[in-house]
Image (cartoon, grey):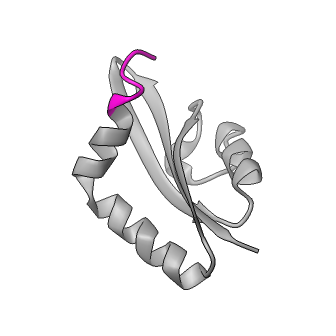
Amino acid sequence: MPFYVYLLINKKDDKLISYVGYTRDLKKRVNLHNSSKGAKFTRGRTWILAYKQKYLTKNKAMKEEYLLKKNYKKRIFIKKKFINL
């Protein structure tokens, strides 16, 4: 079963906030975030899936999640698509 690296976005006070994570069940994980049962940072907000990438191993997904968290230019590029939320 594959793993997914994902980026969620939320608009707060005309500012886009992003969250990066990895999971096996993408649909379930996004639903957990939106029902305030996901990561503490994501509670109380409505999130939109802005980016996802599939990986065959957990190790590769974890490495890519770490890189995406640190790559602010790529995160900004992805968020720009959602500027008009």
Compare residues 28 and 44 and report the one nearer the observer: 28
Classify residue 77 as left or right of residue 65. left
Classify residue 64 as left or right of residue 6. left
Residue at the image point whose x is 43% and y is 77% from the top: 63
> In the figure, residue 13 lies in which quadrant?
top left
Residue 8 point in image, percent of width and height: 51, 43
Residue 63 on the magenta span? no
Q: Is residue 57 above or below residue 13?
A: below
Classify residue 2 as left or right of residue 50. right
Q: Is residue 59 above or below residue 65?
A: below
Query: For the stretch drawn in magenta, what is the main secondary structure?
Result: loop
Residue 48 point in image, percent of width and height: 57, 34
> In the figure, residue 1 lies in which quadrant?
bottom right
Q: Is residue 78 above or below residue 71?
A: above
Q: Is residue 43 above or below residue 68?
A: above
Residue 15 point in image, percent of width and height: 32, 25
- Looking at the rendering, the stretch of residues picked out in magenta corresponds to 80-85
Residue at the image point whose x is 64% and y is 45% from the top: 33
Residue at the image point whose x is 35% and y is 60% from the top: 69
Toward the left, the furthest residue is 73
Residue at the image point whose x is 47% and y is 31% from the top: 10
Total residue callouts: 0
Residue 49 point in image, percent of width and height: 57, 40
